[in-house]
Image (tube, rainbow, N blue to C red):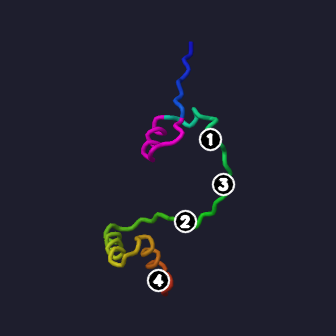
Amino acid sequence: MSKKKRIEPIPEEFSSYAEAADFWDTHDTMDYPGAFRTVRMVGKLRSRHYEIAIDADVLKALKARAHRTGTSLGHLASKILRQQLRSPI
């Protein structure tokens, strides 16, 4: 004897993002097969992000300089690396 799971209808509109998040935190989209459609999307990556290990003291100095100059940490790190790579060893 199997019990059918009661599926609560999706509200027509959510009053906030938080309400929508609460709903979908407790519901599974697989229970609503007719509510969604497959879409085809083509996109281009504009940039890539890489992770590199940096010593704690270097990171601290980099963060301080980025804050002083009003630039992002990533932008400043890229700028410094470019400058260093342009100069001969």
Residue 71 painted magenta: no
Residue on which disc 4 sits: 83
Q: Are marks 2 and 4 in contact (CB under 8 Å)?
A: no
Residue 16 at x, y = what percent? 44, 46
- Tell which tag, 2 or 3, sits nearer the viewer: 3
Q: Real-space Cα distance between discs 1 and 3?
A: 15 Å
Callout 3 amino acid: Met
* Quadrant in which residue 76 is drawn: bottom left
Q: Nearer the viewer, mark 2 or mark 4?
A: 2
Residue nearest the viewer, comparing 29 with 64 = 29
Q: Earlier in the sequence, mark 1 or mark 3?
A: 1
Determine whether label 1 and label 4 are within 8 Å by CB.
Answer: no
- Residue at the image position 39 percent from the left and 67 percent from the top: 54
Q: Which residue is rendered at x = 45% and y = 44% of the image?
A: 15
Question: The residue under label 1 is which amino acid type?
Answer: Phe
Q: Amino acid at mark 2?
A: Arg
SS at badge 4: helix
Q: Which residue is mark 2?
A: 48
Between 73 and 26, the one lying in front of the other is: 26
Q: Which-is-in-front pick, marks 1 and 4?
A: 1
Residue at the location (60% across, 64% down)? 45
- Residue 31 in percent (x, y) is at 57, 32
Q: Is residue 57 above or below residue 39?
A: below
**Distance Cα–Cα, label 1 vs label 2:** 31 Å
Relative to 13, is 75 above or below?
below
Do the numbered discs 1 and 2 sit on residues whose CB atoms are within 8 Å? Answer: no
- Which region of the structure is painted magenta? 10-26
Among the two numbered marks 2 and 4 on one chain, the one whose residue lies closer to the N terminus: 2
